[in-house]
Amino acid sequence: MIRKFLFATALIATLPFAQSVSAHSHNKDAKVTVVYEHELPNVPGKSMKAVLVEYGPGGFSSAHTHAESAFIYATILEGAINSQVNDGPVVTYRAGESFSEYPGDRHGVSANASKTEPAKLLAVFVVDTDETVLTIPIEN
């Protein structure tokens, strides 16, 4: 738990140098910022990219998938997030809790669990270095 907190804190410390990016074509009160990007020296062709996702009260992101090569480790930094991966149940994760997404997974629900408080999560991607689009909306 301490390692996760220190890792997240170190990545958040890079925020003054962060680059804001669009999360999805359909989102409400979601701000997505790339806060870290680095090629893995011991795994040629792979990079680690970290994305801070900030949801306003009642905020959400539309259903989506990620780059085909992406393995994702997400940690809730503040508040609570409702998440559904593939056909699994909707799970509420609270600050300090984590979940993973595997290559090819579908993220059907990603939403702030609160209508009155903000929520934040840090998503760390291990992805092919040449991937430029990390998130792909699912059109219904």
Image (tube, rainbow, N blue to C red):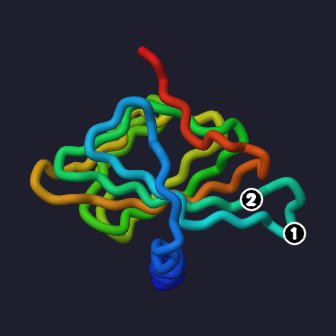
Q: Mark on residue 81?
A: none
- Earlier in the chain: of badge 2 and badge 1, it is 1
User: Against 110, is 35 above or below?
Assistant: below
39 vs 100, nearest the viewer = 39
9 vs 19, nearest the viewer = 19
| Residue type pointed to by label 2 | Ser
* Alpha carbon separation for disc pair 2 and 1: 10 Å
Would you call the spot at circle 2 few (<14 residues within 10 Å), some (14-19), or many (20 or more)?
Answer: many
Task: Quadrant for residue 78, please give it.
Answer: bottom left
Which type of secondary structure does the marked residue at label 1 adopt? loop
Residue 97 horizontal side relative to residue 92, left or right: right
The residue sitting at 45% across, 60% down in the picture is: 52
The residue sitting at 46% across, 18% down in the picture is: 139
Q: Find disc 1 in the rendering and name its residue.
A: 42
Query: Residue 19 location, x and y as percent?
Result: 52, 60
Please indicate, yes or no, whether residue 74 appears anywhere in the rendered image: no
User: Against 31, is 9 above or below?
Assistant: below
| Residue type pointed to by label 1 | Asn
Q: For the residues carrying marks 2 and 1, which lies nearer the camera in this image? A: 2
Q: Find disc 2 in the rendering and name its residue.
A: 47
Would you call the spot at circle 1 few (<14 residues within 10 Å), some (14-19), or many (20 or more)?
Answer: few
Residue 112 horizontal side relative to residue 117, left or right: right
Residue 112 horizontal side relative to residue 64, left or right: left
The residue sitting at 42% across, 14% down in the picture is: 140
Query: Residue 38 location, x and y as percent?
Result: 72, 66
Which type of secondary structure does the marked residue at label 2 adopt? strand
Query: Residue 105 location, x and y as percent?
Result: 57, 36
The residue sitting at 37% across, 70% down in the picture is: 96
